[in-house]
Each structure stands twice: as structure tokens, then as C-alpha cells.
Image (spheres, helix red, strand yellow):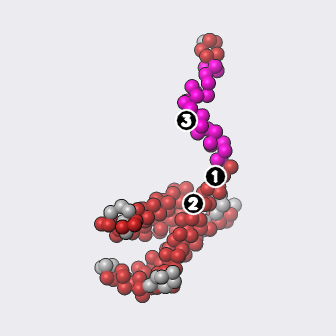
Amino acid sequence: MTQQTTQRAALTPAEQGGIFAVINRRLDSVAQPFDGVAWLALRATTGLLLVPHGAQKLFGIFGGGGISGTAGFLESVGYPTPTLLAILIGCVEFFGGLMLTFGLLTRFIAVAIAVFMAFAVLFHLGNGFFWTARGYEYPLFWAVAALFFVVRGGGAFSLDRKLSA
């Protein structure tokens, strides 16, 4: 028994799980202090990239059609209540993007974003995968990013966390 214990202690780090395990443990120790910042970076990027899309739909800026242009497009592709949908989509993107950026009601707004993006994936599905061909790649990525925040919340640097403290 003593000899087995001595043999285990004599194993090199690489032998105690392989070289990748050693590298992973070292990277964990370096990355751990940045966990909250990484969370914030993903949340803020996801939110801020949605805001201009919402501004296009709500306010007609950045080359967007505003509510009437968005409603006209939605009507042309067969969606019912196009004006209401244009307002809802614009609000999810613009105000939801801002809320996600700051981590306010993160899980609630992330559900709304994920649902909207699921519809966007279905809309773009017939165009194939790549976004350059108007495919579903972009909305799928943002749906998955939103689902991360549904599951994990806003993180350490969020208004949700500050308000619940």
C-alpha cells in the first residue's frame, strides 16, 4: 500500500491526466480572474449589436425603413398584424438590446431575444447556412448567445446582480 502511494506521488503532471489537462488547469488559473469581464463582454456585445437593428425598425435610421417600412416588409412576406410585429421586433432589438447590455431583467429579455431569433432562423432557413447568402447563421448564433443568458443570468457585472444585492 505504501509503495502504491509513493508511486502515485511520483507521477508527473502530464501522467496525472495528460498534458492537455495540465495546460487546461494552468489556463484556468490565468483566466479565472477575468470570468466576470468575459461574461460582461459577451452580454454587452450581444446587446449592443442588436440595438442598431432595432433602431432601423423603430426610427428608420442606419438605412432602416422605420416602423412603416418594417411593417410593409412583414406584410409582403405574409405575417399577420405587421405593424404590431414591427413594433415588437424593434422593441426587442432596441430596448431589449440595451437591457441585455446593462444586464437588466437579463433572463426575461434573453428569452424574448431567443424567441425572436428562433423565428429569424426559420425565416432565413431556406437561404442556407451562410449569412452572406442571407442564411440563418447570424440569427442562430444570437439565439444561442441569448440562451446562454437565459440559463446563466447576467453575471457579476450586471444591474440584476446590483439590484439583488
- Marks 1,3: beta carbons within 8 A: no
Q: Which residue, given by chain and number where applicable, does mark 3 sit on?
A: 20
As measured in the structure, the alpha-carbon distance from the residue carrying label 1 to the one carrying label 2 is 11 Å
The residue that appears at 60% across and 60% down in the rendered structure is 41
Q: Describe residue 82's horizontal placement relative to residue 43 as left or right.
A: left
Query: Which is more toward the observer, 18 or 6?
Result: 18
The residue that appears at 64% across and 63% down in the rendered structure is 158
Q: Which residue, given by chain and number where applicable, does mark 1 sit on?
A: 35
Chief SS of the magenta region: helix
Hey, what amino acid is under mark 2?
A: Leu
Position in image of residue 73 (x %, y %): 36, 82
Q: Is residue 3 above or below residue 19?
A: above
Q: Which residue, given by chain and number where applicable, does mark 2 sit on?
A: 42
Quick one: label 2 or label 3, which is nearer the N terminus?
3
Q: Describe residue 138's horizontal placement relative to residue 22 as left or right.
A: left
Quick one: label 1 or label 2, which is nearer the N terminus?
1
Whether residue 21 is visible to the viewer of this picture, yes or no, is yes
**SS at badge 2:** helix
Position in image of residue 105 (x %, y %): 57, 67
Hey, what amino acid is under mark 1?
A: Asp
As measured in the structure, the alpha-carbon distance from the residue carrying label 2 to the one carrying label 3 is 26 Å
In the picture, which quadrant includes the C terminus?
bottom right
Query: Which is more toward the observer, 5 or 129?
Result: 129
Hey, what amino acid is under mark 3?
A: Phe
As measured in the structure, the alpha-carbon distance from the residue carrying label 1 to the one carrying label 3 is 21 Å
The stretch in magenta equals 8-32
Give the quadrant of residue 7: top right
Position in image of residue 34 (x %, y %): 66, 52
Quick one: label 1 or label 3, which is nearer the N terminus?
3
Q: Describe residue 154's horizontal placement relative to residue 147 as left or right.
A: right
The residue that appears at 37% across and 85% down in the rendered structure is 72
